[in-house]
Image (tube, rainbow, N blue to C red):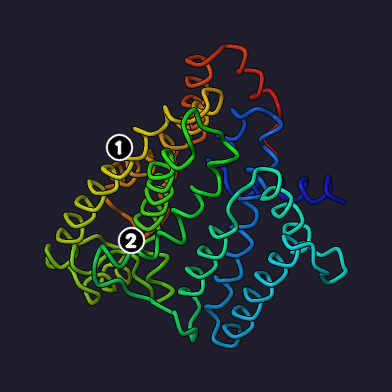
Amino acid sequence: MLDRAYRDCRRIAAAHGRTYFLATRLLEPERRPAVHALYAFARLVDDIVDASDAPSRAAESAARLDRIEHELRARLADAPTEPGDSHEQRVLLAVSDTIRRYSIAAEHFWVFLDSMRMDIPGAPQYRDRYPTMGELEDYMRGSAAAIGLQLLPVLGTVVPVAEAEPAAAALGEAFQLTNFLRDVGEDLGRGRVYLPADELAAFGVDDELLFHCHESGRTEPRVRRALAHMIAINRGVYRRATSGIELLAPRVRPAIRTAATLYGGILDEIERADYAVFTGRAVVPQHRRLRVAARECLSASPRLLPVFREPLQ
């Protein structure tokens, strides 16, 4: 049952987290299932939240998050859980095993779920705008930094875990801010803006202008300048995060450097497309993803290269 649960998580990571999954190929095989389980749990919750955009399903999504938290708490406390073998239960089985095996602080999962409730219309915590960068960072502490902190015990460190936590949290935030910049158009289509209003206002950008760009499919010069500014902020977060990679166990550093380089590469693709974030998603081409990963393999040890002979799926 547990093996099947971890296999399910691997399939989810391979299908939906291409950059993330490729980076895990540089990890020792025994660490990969735990990383896949953490990804699958985050994906499960994210899919539930996305479904809440339909007004008729918001209450159902909130109830499912409550049920997931209750079930995960029960599993971690060795309390009775609902019988069954659903996809949701298999993911929870794998992630609860990962939490125990690597002594991950459960608090990181409760903080994550609280942030996800901020994305459910009708929930008391719901937010679809962030007036300041500070308020957006509060959201990302749960939705992104918490994921970096969940991963840290799995990756391992050469210093006490607490010393590596600030950089791990920053890397999670860097990834999420990249997502926000890549998905501006998609988020507007859902009535949401995940960029801080005060930073945009400095360039004369407001909701009305963003929606105009979304409807026309054209990036107005003021918006282009604002996005360039946000990309500069995002790169600063990456610099803060990547300075902590040397605090990780040596064997996992190539994987994390690969993930950071490839995700940061999405910003390059946004610039290369002249900030056309309203008409599609910026994607790092597969040949570039493989080249970056292979380079990290060679810089660490040529013996790592065989991991790319395995099929990606």
Residue identifier under label 1: 239
Please tell me how crowded label 2 is: few (under 14), some (14-19), or many (20+) other residues with Cα within 10 Å.
Answer: some
Give how far across and how far down residue 147 sits, in percent.
51, 52
Residue at 44 percent of width and 53 percent of height = 145
Residue at 47 percent of width and 15 percent of height = 299
In-image side of 155 versus 75 (left or right): left
In-image side of 292 versus 229 (left or right): right
Give how far across and how far down residue 87 sits, in percent.
77, 61
The residue tagged with tag 2: helix, strand or loop?
A: helix
Q: Residue furthest top?
A: 302
Q: Residue 44 carries which label?
A: none
Disc 2 residue type? Answer: Glu
Depth order, front residue of 141/259: 141
Residue at 32 percent of width and 68 percent of height = 214
Residue identifier under label 2: 137
Q: Is 108 rendered above or below residue 242?
A: below
Disc 1 residue type? Answer: Arg
Residue at 46 percent of width and 85 percent of height = 124
Give how far across and how far down residue 64 sits, in percent.
66, 76
Please tell me how crowded label 1 is: few (under 14), some (14-19), or many (20+) other residues with Cα within 10 Å.
Answer: some
Q: How many marks?
A: 2
Q: Is 222 rendered above or below residue 5?
A: below
Q: In which quarter of the image is the C terminus?
A: top right
The residue tagged with tag 1: helix, strand or loop?
A: helix
Quadrant for residue 189, please give it: bottom left
Depth order, front residue of 64/272: 64
Asked if the residue at tag 2 contacts the one at tag 1, i.e. Cβ–Cβ closer than 8 Å, the answer is: no
Spatial CA distance of label 1 from label 2 is: 17 Å
| Earlier residue among tags 1 and 2 | 2
Give how far across and how far down residue 118 sits, in percent.
45, 74
Q: Is 245 rendered above or below residue 4?
A: above
